[in-house]
Structures are given as structure tokens and as C-alpha cells.
């Protein structure tokens, strides 16, 4: 823990949903839910208007529909999210050379690594308000919440306190007073399952946690989680902010069609991946010391956990055992969308191109999904709700709903007032994917804003083939 509040955590507010509201004027001020649109889909982000109805990230889409049937249900436009994210990350790099992105909408910044500056809480608060105003300008209206504190833990917790569109600076020395009365779930990594185990033994707040012996928590939660929780409950956290670097590594990762919550299945996947990594190390006559497990949650939050061995290895058994241990220490939350296993710390003579030719490597699996060329003749299922489109005569708009061989488009953009809707045949040659293109075909299910003058869209009635 530092003596200055110089670790900044920034989190964009309801990011995916806010980008949609920015680009779709008719959805501003209305509930918007972005996520897997199919029956087994999960909510990635709900706008604040939808949260009022109890819709949350990680909730089954079916439940979200039941709670907020009048919301717009959109399948997401990752190109647009990436573009906004790049603007924000670029602005953060003006604050400090040390920026550690956690996901598209979240990053740590080490303010002490930049030019020498006043790190008193008041000065930091002023600086953050300028930063947030700049982000709003650059992104044309997106808001961010920021926490600044003496550690990553407290900065992350602080960014929640004034959310949305707020700043909280934790003055050094006040960490424990702030943290103590909070629920244990305020500590990152304490998911519902861990919280429930703790609740059964009478631990609800962080103060309760601090009153317990480390041995008891280790017995309850296992040694890695138990010990780390004891440290974090005392706000004892000296993890550095680490900028992303190009690291030489051998890795394998895979995206699941559905979010996986079954631990046994994940263990089997991780075991297989570790053996594939070992196989490739051996083929390349390589060995490495650091074993990394990468996971991506349903909401695209991505984490890596690593363990460094005493010496380099290419043993499938050792790699599998270490990768399994990292998985065991991971909260599965609402399910995992992606898992990867990698080894780094390789010898310098590694040939970079050794890995480029391997079809098993997916750096950005979503890119591949999004870049698939469309079929020659489009059907309703090729138009996913929310996707950008362009019509030869009507201009730019987005897919409002699709089904029964038809697609309904609302013609509006971020720069126009709310626009009209028109319905076309799904294979209308005048209609093409717009800037971001239709996302991966999914079960079409339209947004159905109840009071819309255009009436009920044709979506949710089948695939129109
Ligand atoms: Mg966020």
C-alpha cells in the first residue's frame, strides 16, 4: 500500500448499453439490454433504465425479458465498443505511461509513474474531473466513474462508490474505515458462492472477515483464496499497475458457444489445453517458467492468473497441474466465455513465427466471428438486433427487429434526431450491413418498445427462412 492516493481505477458506466444509446437516439432514456439474444443467452450490460427493473449483468436473458419486456434487446456491436474503448485508453495514457486495461471499459492507471505532480487528494480530484470531462467529449457522451486510492483494491472499490458519472478519492489512512462496513462482496473476486459460504459462518461484512483467524478462512475457502482474502480485508494490497507488454509465449485458448459454469467441464478443458501447450513447446524445443490461465467472463471482463515455477519446463503433467491450480482459485461468476492456457518466460531464441501459423491460436476470437462474410442471400436471421445497416435510399440505421423473412430498420444515427422505421424483405439488395456490419447471426428477437408509433416489429417470430 502506498502513502499517496495514486492508483486510479476507471470504469465506463453501463458501457455497451451507453454506446448503444449514444448511437441510437430513440433509445436514449429507455431501457436497453445488450447480451446473448438467444434463449440461453446472458445479459452483458443493462442500461440504468433497465436496472431499475432489476435487470443485472449475468442474468439469464429469459429472466431479463420477464422483468423488463419493454426494453430494447440488442446483440452488441463490438467494433463500436472497441472504437470507444481505444479513445478512452488513449486519453488515459496521457495521464501516465502505466495503464493496465482490464477489459474494454476498465483500466488501472498509475498516477505516480507519470510526470511529477501533486498527488494530494484535492489535486487528484481536480485532475480526475478534467479527465472525465475529456472522456465525455472524446467519446461524444460516454460517462466514466473513477476511484483513486493507495492500492488497486481500494481504487476499484472507490470507483463503485459514486457510480455512475462520479469520482471518489480515498484519502490515505482512511482505507480501513471505508472498507470495514462493506459487504464481503465488495472485495473483487468474492462472488455469490464465496459470499454464501462466508455468510453461513456468520461473516457478512469486511469487518466480520477481519475478526476471523486466517486458519479458519483457509479451511473454509482453501489456502490461496483464504490467505488472499485475509490480506485484502486489511486493505493490504501492493500489486503494481502493469502496462501490457508483448510477451513471448505459447498459448492455446478457446471461446465457448455458451457461457460455461460447470467446473468439472472446465477442468477437463484446461487439462487438454495444458497438454497441447506442452506438445507445442516440445515440437519447438522450448520450455517456459510462467504458466498463465486466461479467463473471460460473460461480460467480456478478462483476467489472467499466473504462477512462476522454480525452473523452466515442458512437462505436460507439470503444466496441467499448475493450470488446474489456477483454475481452482478462480471464481466462475456467471460463467466463462473463454479459457486459455499459456506458458511464457521462454528462452530468447524462440522464433516468433513459430506460433503464427498455428490455427489453434485465437487472439481475438470475436474478430473472426464478426468478419465472417455474409451469405449470398440474406435471411432474417442474418440481421441481428442493433446491428448497423445502410440502405441505398434511406441511408444509415440499425436493425430494430427481424423475422418471417423481413427486417425492420430504424433510420437514425448518433448525429440525427430519433428517426423513422421501415420494413424490408430480408434479402432486399438495397440493404447492406453498415459500418460495424451485422454481428453473428443469432436467434432474431426484436426490440419491442411498447409505445412506439411504428407499432409492433416483426421480430421474435422465427427465422424467416
Ligand atoms: Mg463498466
Image (tube, helix red, strand yellow):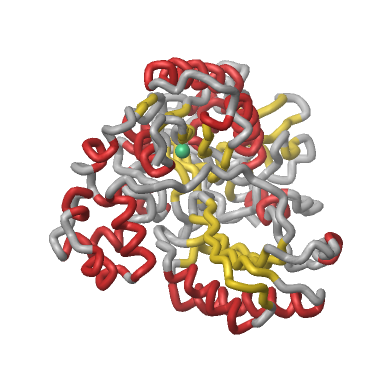
Q: Residue at x 45, y 32 (%)?
A: 13
Can residue 448 be seen in the rendering of this structure? Answer: no
Residue 33 percent location from the top left of the image: 45, 41
- Nearest the eye: 191 or 108: 108
Q: Residue at x 30, y 63 (%)?
A: 193
Q: Residue at x 45, y 78 (%)?
A: 264
- Vertical relation: 271 (above or below) 199: below
- Vertical relation: 424 (above or below) 396: below
231 horizontally vs 98: left or right: left
* Quadrant of the image occupied by residue 162: top left
Can residue 50 be seen in the rendering of this structure? Answer: yes
- Quarter of the image with the N terminus is top left
* Quadrant of the image occupied by residue 199: bottom left
Residue 361 percent location from the top left of the image: 73, 63
- Quarter of the image with the C terminus is bottom right
Count up the numbered dots: 0
Residue 111 percent location from the top left of the image: 52, 29
Residue 339 percent location from the top left of the image: 57, 64
135 horizontally vs 48: left or right: right
Q: Residue at x 43, y 64 (%)?
A: 330
Toward the bottom, the furthest residue is: 317
- Nearest the eye: 274 or 144: 274
- Nearest the eye: 263 or 2: 2
- Vertical relation: 212 (above or below) 19: below
373 horizontally vs 165: left or right: right
Amino acid at each position: 500500500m502506498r502513502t499517496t492516493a495514486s492508483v486510479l481505477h476507471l470504469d465506463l458506466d453501463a458501457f455497451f448499453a451507453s454506446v448503444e444509446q449514444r448511437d441510437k437516439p430513440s433509445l436514449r432514456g429507455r431501457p436497453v439490454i445488450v447480451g446473448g439474444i438467444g434463449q440461453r443467452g446472458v445479459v452483458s450490460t443493462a442500461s440504468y433504465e433497465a436496472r431499475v427493473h432489476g435487470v443485472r449483468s449475468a442474468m439469464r436473458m429469459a429472466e431479463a425479458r420477464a422483468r423488463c419486456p419493454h426494453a430494447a434487446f440488442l446483440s452488441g456491436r463490438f467494433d463500436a465498443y472497441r472504437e470507444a474503448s481505444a479513445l478512452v485508453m488513449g486519453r488515459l495514457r496521457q495521464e501516465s505511461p502505466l495503464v493496465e486495461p482490464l477489459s474494454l471499459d476498465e483500466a488501472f492507471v498509475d498516477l505516480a509513474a507519470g510526470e511529477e505532480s501533486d498527488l494530494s487528494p484535492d489535486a487528484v480530484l481536480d485532475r480526475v474531473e478534467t479527465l472525465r470531462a475529456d472522456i465525455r467529449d472524446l467519446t461524444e457522451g460516454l460517462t466514466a466513474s473513477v476511484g483513486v486510492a493507495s492500492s488497486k483494491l481500494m481504487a476499484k472499490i472507490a470507483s463503485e462508490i459514486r457510480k455512475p458519472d462520479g469520482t471518489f478519492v480515498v484519502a490515505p489512512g482512511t482505507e480501513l474505515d471505508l472498507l470495514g462496513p462493506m459487504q464481503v462482496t465488495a472485495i473483487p473476486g468474492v462472488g455469490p458462492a464465496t459470499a454464501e459460504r462466508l455468510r453461513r459462518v456468520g461473516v457478512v461484512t469486511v469487518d466480520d472477515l477481519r475478526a476471523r483467524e486466517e486458519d479458519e478462512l483457509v479451511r473454509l475457502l482453501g489456502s490461496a483464496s483464504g490467505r488472499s482474502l485475509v490480506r485484502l480485508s486489511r486493505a493490504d494490497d501492493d500489486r503494481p499497475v502493469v502496462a501490457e507488454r508483448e510477451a513471448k509465449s505459447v498459448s492455446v485458448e478457446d471461446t465457448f458457444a455458451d457461457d460455461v459454469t460447470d467446473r468439472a467441464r472446465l477442468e477437463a478443458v484446461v487439462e487438454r489445453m495444458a497438454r497441447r501447450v506442452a506438445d507445442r513447446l516440445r515440437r519447438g524445443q522450448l520450455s517456459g517458467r510462467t504458466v498463465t490461465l486466461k479467463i473471460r467472463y460473460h461480460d467480456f471482463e478478462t483476467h489472467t492468473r499466473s504462477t512462476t515455477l522454480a525452473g523452466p519446463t515442458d512437462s505436460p503433467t507439470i503444466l496441467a497441474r499448475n493450470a488446474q491450480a489456477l483454475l481452482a482459485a478462480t471464481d466462475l461468476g456467471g460463467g466463462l466465455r473463454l479459457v486459455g492456457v499459456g506458458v511464457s518466460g521462454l528462452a530468447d531464441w524462440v522464433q516468433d513465427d513459430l506460433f503464427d501459423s498455428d490455427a489453434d491460436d485465437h487472439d481475438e476470437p470475436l474478430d473472426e466471428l464478426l468478419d465472417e462474410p455474409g451469405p449470398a442471400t440474406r435471411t432474417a436471421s442474418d440481421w441481428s438486433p442493433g446491428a448497423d445497416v445502410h440502405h441505398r435510399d434511406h441511408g444509415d440505421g440499425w436493425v430494430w427487429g427481424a423475422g418471417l423473412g423481413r427486417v425492420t430498420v430504424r433510420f437514425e444515427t448518433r448525429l440525427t434526431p430519433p428517426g423513422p422505421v421501415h420494413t424490408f424483405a430480408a434479402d432486399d439488395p438495397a440493404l447492406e450491413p453498415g459500418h460495424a456490419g451485422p454481428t453473428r447471426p443469432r436467434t432474431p428477437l426484436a426490440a419491442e418498445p411498447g409505445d412506439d408509433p411504428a407499432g409492433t416489429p416483426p421480430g421474435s417470430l422465427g427465422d424467416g427462412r
